[in-house]
Image (spheres, helix red, strand yellow):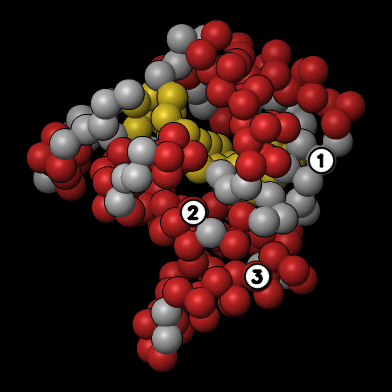
Amino acid sequence: MGFASSSSCSSFLRSEPYFIYDVFINFWGQDIGRKFVSHLHAVLLQAQVKTLLNEEKFHEGMKVEEHKRAIACSKIAIIVFSETYTESTNCLLELEKIIECRQTFGQIVLPVFYEIDPLDVRHQKDDFGRTLAETAHKSYSGEQMEHALSRWSRALTTAASIIGWDVRDFSMMPNFWMLLLIAFRHYWTIRTSLLPNFLLD
């Protein structure tokens, strides 16, 4: 799979964004990838949605700046929050870029809360919040650590406040996949009013 060059994607800051991908999926963890994201990816492929997974980039040795350029070249970002999400510095840096793109050119952002309470993400509560602080301490020191923690906290709060899917209730999963497929077949005209009624407020 090819990736966009720096010149092709950086132009979105000056004019209309140049899209390479339909969807970028931001997630962390092999279990999440196997249990959930692989199925999500299959549904999107079935809908002929050009999708990029952040795990694909890790395997190909892409640098963080290349990750960010790929995000900037995506129409839609799906963020899969899980209990282990804040273990990954790269995921958090990607999240920052996703929120920036949402604010800059209106990138559509769809959060998915997989086996985690959305309020834990929004307010960085309990283990989710403690792991976030530990990741910041491992990645930075001094003022850089404080700034990173503050940025990540704001990005998590913003993302978790966007309407999204709570998939803790696995009895809803068949409907989830069906409705997701329908939504992405028509994603050019997706609006909040078209989303399923079990989405979060």
| Residue 193 can be seen, yes or no | no
Label 3 and label 1: CA atoms lie apart by 21 Å
| Horizontal arrangement in the rendering, residue 120 relative to residue 51 (left or right) | right
For the residues carrying marks 3 and 1, which lies nearer the camera in this image?
3
Q: Which residue is mark 3?
A: 131
Q: Image check: 10 left or right of 147?
A: left
User: Cβ–Cβ below 8 Å for labels 3 and 1?
Assistant: no
Q: Nearer the viewer, residue 98 or 195?
A: 98
Q: Residue at x 49, y 54 (%)?
A: 91
157, above or below 198, in the image: below
Residue to which mark 2 is pinned:
91
Q: Is residue 181 left or right of residue 2?
A: right
| Mark before the other along the chain sequence, 3 or 2 | 2
Look at the picture and state if 89 lies above or below 138.
Answer: above
Q: Residues within 10 Å of mark 1 (few under 14, many from 20)?
A: some
Three-letter code, disc 1? Arg
- Return the residue nearer the eye: 66 or 164: 66
Where the C terminus falls, by quadrant? top right
Disc 3 is placed on an element classified as helix
Estimate the x, y position of residue 45 in percent, counting from the top left. Answer: 51, 13
Q: Give percent across and percent down for residue 194.
A: 60, 22
Instruction: Measuring from the top left, give residue 99's x and y in whole percent.
Output: 42, 52
Residue 21, quarter of picture: top left
The amino acid beneath tag 3 is: Thr
